[in-house]
Amino acid sequence: MTFTAWALAALAIVLAWPAPIVLSRSRWPRRSPATAMILWQAIGLAGGLSMIGAMLTWGLAPLGDNLFSALNRLICIVFFNASVEGLLFWHAFALSAAGLLGAHLLFTLALTYFRIARQRKRHRELLLLLSSPTERPGTVVINHAAPVAYCLPGGARSVTVLSDGLLDLLSPQELRAVLTHENTHLLQRHHLLLWAFAAWKSALPWLPTSKLAQRAVNELIEMLADDAALRVVEEETLVRSIALVAAGGAEAEPPSPPQTAPEDTTAARLDRLLHPQPPLSLAARASILVVSILLLAAPTALLVVPALLSMTVS
């Protein structure tokens, strides 16, 4: 149990500090954003499980030789007033910290969801008053000079919002690129990824992983949507549409759409399109996916496998 606690703690430290820093500075994610997105999710989930698992196993160490027997004794202590012999202050503190951290993460996830849902509901109500429908299903237009385009998720009520300034500025093909980009966000459920990583940052704002991950995910989902747009328009058309929208948005103060892309994300998108690189090879992508799976499996294996082996031997 003690070895498991130290192993999980070491894994948590690696995933909380050097791993996200190295990944955020790498150039390869731009070549295969979907693969990089999976790796970021694996790092976040495995890091959280490792942190909680390390504290849990350290606290349970004096209560049994394996996870199952230790948990069984902990239940007896909590509910049946069993002896607490061997359970020191630091073990009790670690168990409390594991429970509090797990509850904090789940509570923040739920709180972030309801906060975002409330903001979207309010925004949707404003759109009903300020927007006009178009011949395109699920698309509305607002009266504003700034070129604005964004999507508002909501299941069957999802809508893509355009501005008069955007329609006046872009050619039909450029508008097609923008619409495809925004619709891809909805089809691929990118708002769920943004929700999860926003909750992670809110729960652990001091953790480098949470800050770097949210920034990277914002950038990667924009690149995924750009890749979808490139399937229906030429690269030059997409570049012009991004540049025109960015330049026009800087000249006039647009409304505040939810989850807008920051300027550095726009610069990264343009740089990627103007200096294209081939996607990662199949072998490289497969290797990264294997690493992601191993990262997700490692905390569970460190917790469960020793217990199963101990039970088998006995």
Image (spheres, grey):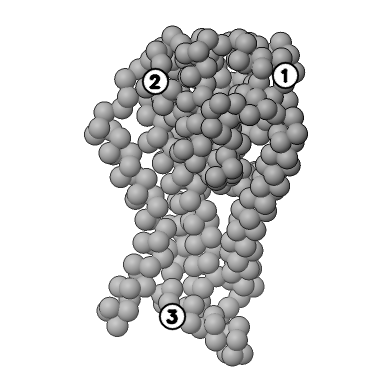
Tag 3 residue: 69
Comparing marks 3 and 1, which lies closer to the viewer? 1
1 and 2 marks in contact (CB < 8 Å): no
In this orientation, which residue lies closer to the viewer: 181 or 143? Answer: 143
Q: Measured from the top left, where is residue 10 in percent x and y? A: 46, 52
Q: How many marks?
A: 3
Q: In this view, does 166 lie above or below 115?
A: above
Q: Measured from the top left, where is residue 220 in percent x and y? A: 48, 30
Whether residue 311 can be seen here: yes
Q: How many other residues sit within 10 Å of disc 1, few (<14), some (14-19) or many (≥20)? A: some
Mark positioned earlier in the residue sequence (1 or 2): 1
Mark positioned earlier in the residue sequence (3 or 1): 3
The picture quadrant where one finds residue 28 is: top left
Using the image, tell me which numbered label, if any, was put on residue 144.
1
Q: Which amino acid does label 3 sit on?
A: Ser
In this orientation, which residue lies closer to the viewer: 83 or 165? Answer: 165
What residue is at 37 percent from the left and 22 percent from the top?
231
Q: How many other residues sit within 10 Å of disc 2, few (<14), some (14-19) or many (≥20)? A: few
Between the C-alphas of marks 1 and 2, the distance is 27 Å
What residue is at 48 percent from the left and 82 percent from the top?
72
Tag 2 residue: 232
